[in-house]
């Protein structure tokens, strides 16, 4: 069993969102970077659990990004995993990221590829489905539970207004969200071990980007809250009905 | 060149978000001086001609038993086949569970640039640039698509249901349908409830409600408003409420017309999932709760007193 987990780096969930260079770039001064929560808490931890159950399993981590991703990748390795790969390329194009990962995945013959449900900065929800299409293998999105049974997996995924249980033959790509696993904190032994685990830096393959971010924008500030006294809920109902026109 | 809108259906019914996608695709087609057509997979009991009311000229339908469940690999191949056959240049999905499952794979099959989570019509005079939400609703990005074919998924409730008067024609389309890549062994729908991502109104409770036994007041208010119920993360983590109700940065992201937050402090990660709501009402006993800064209307007060009174006042208004 060979498992590949896709890891991306995102600003901390409490980071101040601001832009620089004429609103073309994220202002990263003073920002703390974390592993994208969906990748860490759900994709990676579930993969580590699979390896704990079957120690012969091989668990690789992959990220597409610059050298500033190395700290994040080491932190991921401190949680678990045998080795990590970083494809040395900075891009904002999902197609390019997916193509880089798919190229490595094809060569590595992975049985399972886990991604997070989405990155909390770009909110693409795209990379997993793209990798699956490039490899021409099944894709199960928004998974909340995953059970392995030989070369077959039973996956619960979110659908609109409920959930669906699918059975799929491996290889497959799964995008992971809440429910897959419980968040873990790296321990000292893991952190020490991560220092000596291989982190291979790979050259990117040539691709042509299909999208490009030209500018960012912050939403307009809210006008301010209208407070209604607690003993006059009728006034709130009137405002919602007549002013906001939402009820 | 034309715009093709993917119509998502569940058990034969067109999803609400797909009507909005149709309105968006039709407005885009008008902007590009071309026609808007729709594509629906599987068997549908709803009247497809009504898509004409949202500006759609023709609805193409592909019926095959393998299409009654959303299988990302199968859907992607079938939709890509249809796009090629119809020579469409822009493909529009809703950014719902189906869109997220299928659109990225379609983009690869067609080598098309993809923008997910669009929240406005693209500008098309020079470059094709799509506005999308990023940083979980805390900002927007303008993304240029440079490929010949473009794929867009639009955020539910971001464009609106602009209607025209019209009736679409329906045409059956033949595209190779591959064998399923996954086997569906069970489907569990939360019955009788309004699905959270489709709801116009959402009533949400936080830790301020003290325990699961107190959710009656939230449910009564939701029921009165035909609203869906939601909760903050600690509430789901403590199993007071089911996980699918958890909204926020790490939960479901929603953009209803009205979001009523009861006993929720308004942490930044919570706001990230709800700040695209058109109107936000906060009920919290602490006047310093950060949520008031993100709210349109607020009541400083005890939820256990305010919420039942609010429900009664809404009922009184409805009966007038
Ligand atoms: C990486 C990360 C991701 C996260 N993702 C999410 C997420 O997706 N969604 C999410 O919700 N949280 C998320 N959180 C947690 C978030 O930071 C907050 O801890 C959480 O939102 C607080 O939930 P709460 O408002 O229900 O509880 P509290 O913060 O405890 O607030 C309870 C509120 O109820 C009020 N109250 C108490 N009694 C009453 C009463 N009788 N009547 C009226 N009001 C009353 C209090 O004044 C208080 O404001 C995340 C945290 C991290 C670190
Ligand atoms: N640069 C990247 N390197 C590795 N994996 C990534 C990268 N970007 C996104 N991913 C993976 O793809 C998932 C979905 O990302 P996105 O499509 O950007 O929302 C993330 O949760 C990651 O698992």
Image (cartoon, helix red, strand yellow):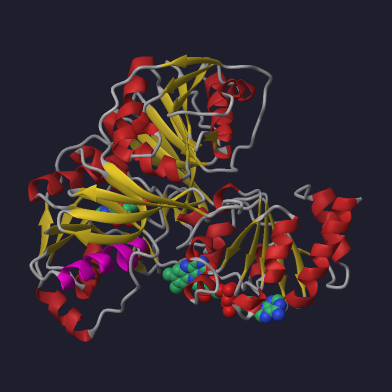
Region of the chain picked out in magenta, as a range:
A38-53
Taking A76 as reference, is B202 above or below it?
above
Q: Nearer the viewer, residue A127 or A154?
A: A154
Q: Residue at x 17, y 71 (%)?
A: A53
Taking B53 as reference, is A16 above or below it?
below
Taking B92 as reference, is B118 above or below it?
below
Q: Residue at x 28, y 52 (%)?
A: A174
Q: Position of residue B178 (x, y in %)?
A: 26, 29
Q: Residue at x 26, y 61 (%)?
A: A147
Task: Residue B279: name its quadrant.
Answer: bottom right
Q: Position of residue A2 (x, y in %)?
A: 12, 58
Relative to B170, is B311 on the left or the right?
right
| Residue B279 part of the magenta-drawn span | no
Ligand 1: give its quadrant.
Answer: bottom right
Q: Position of residue A216 (x, y in %)?
A: 47, 47
Q: Residue at x 40, y 44 (%)?
A: B100
Image quadrant where one finds the N terminus of chain A: bottom left
In this orientation, does residue A116 appear?
A: no
Q: How many marks?
A: 0
Secondary structure, magenta segment, majority class: helix
| Residue A51 part of the magenta-drawn span | yes
Q: Nearer the viewer, residue B189 or B273?
A: B189
Task: Residue B270: name its quadrant.
Answer: bottom right
Task: Residue A57: name its quadrant.
Answer: bottom left
Taking A205 as reference, is A192 above or below it?
below
Q: Position of residue B68 (x, y in %)?
A: 40, 35
In this orientation, does residue A15 appear?
A: yes
């Amino acid at each position: 069993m060979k498992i590949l987990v896709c890891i991306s780096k995102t600003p901390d969930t409490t980071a101040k969102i601001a832009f620089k260079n004429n609103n073309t770039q994220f202002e990263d001064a003073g920002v703390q970077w974390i592993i994208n929560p969906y990748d860490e808490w759900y994709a990676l931890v579930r993969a580590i659990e699979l390896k704990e159950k079957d120690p012969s399993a091989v668990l690789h981590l992959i990220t597409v990004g610059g050298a500033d991703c190395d700290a994040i990748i080491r932190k991921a390795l401190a949680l678990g995993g045998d080795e990590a790969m970083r494809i040395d390329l900075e891009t904002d194009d999902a197609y390019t990221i997916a193509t880089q990962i798919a190229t490595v995945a094809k060569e590595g013959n992975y049985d399972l590829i886990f991604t997070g449900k989405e990155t909390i900065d770009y909110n693409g929800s795209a990379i997993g489905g793209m990798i699956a299409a490039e490899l021409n293998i099944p894709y199960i999105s928004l998974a909340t539970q995953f059970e392995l049974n030989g070369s077959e997996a039973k996956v619960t995924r979110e659908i609109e207004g409920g959930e669906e249980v699918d059975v799929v033959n491996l290889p497959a790509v799964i995008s992971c969200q809440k429910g897959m696993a419980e968040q873990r904190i790296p321990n000292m032994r893991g952190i020490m071990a991560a220092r000596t685990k291989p982190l291979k830096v790979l050259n990117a393959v040539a691709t042509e980007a299909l999208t490009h971010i030209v500018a960012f924008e912050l939403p307009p500030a809210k006008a301010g809250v209208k407070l209604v006294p607690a003993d006059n809920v009728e006034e709130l109902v009137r405002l919602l009905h007549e002013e906001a026109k939402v009820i | 060149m034309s715009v093709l809108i993917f119509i998502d259906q569940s058990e034969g019914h067109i999803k609400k978000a797909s009507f909005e996608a149709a309105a968006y695709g039709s407005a885009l087609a008008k902007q590009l001086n071309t026609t808007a057509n729709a594509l629906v997979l599987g068997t549908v009991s709803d009247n497809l001609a009504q898509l004409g009311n949202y500006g759609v000229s023709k609805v193409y339908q592909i019926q095959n038993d393998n299409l009654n469940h959303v299988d990302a690999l199968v859907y992607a191949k079938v939709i890509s086949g249809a796009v090629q056959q119809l020579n469409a240049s822009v493909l529009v999905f809703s950014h719902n569970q189906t869109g997220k499952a299928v659109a990225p794979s379609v983009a690869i099959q067609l080598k098309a640039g993809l923008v997910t989570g669009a929240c406005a019509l693209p500008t098309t005079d020079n470059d094709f640039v799509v506005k999308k939400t990023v940083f979980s609703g805390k900002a927007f990005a303008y993304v240029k698509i440079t490929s010949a074919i473009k794929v867009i998924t639009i955020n539910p409730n971001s464009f609106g249901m602009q209607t025209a008067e019209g009736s679409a024609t329906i045409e059956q389309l033949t595209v190779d349908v591959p064998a399923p890549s996954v086997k569906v062994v069970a489907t569990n729908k939360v019955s009788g409830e309004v699905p959270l991502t489709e709801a116009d109104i959402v009533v949400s409770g936080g830790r301020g409600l003290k325990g699961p036994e107190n959710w009656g007041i939230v449910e009564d208010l939701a029921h009165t408003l035909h609203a869906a119920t939601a909760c903050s993360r600690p509430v789901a983590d403590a199993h007071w409420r089911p996980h699918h109700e958890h909204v926020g940065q790490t939960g479901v992201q929603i953009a209803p017309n009205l979001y009523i937050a009861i006993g929720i402090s308004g942490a930044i990660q919570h706001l990230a999932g709800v700040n695209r709501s058109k109107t936000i009402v906060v009920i919290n006993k602490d006047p310093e709760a950060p949520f008031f800064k993100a709210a349109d209307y607020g009541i400083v007060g005890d939820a256990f007193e305010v919420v039942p009174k609010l429900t009664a006042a809404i009922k009184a208004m409805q009966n007038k």
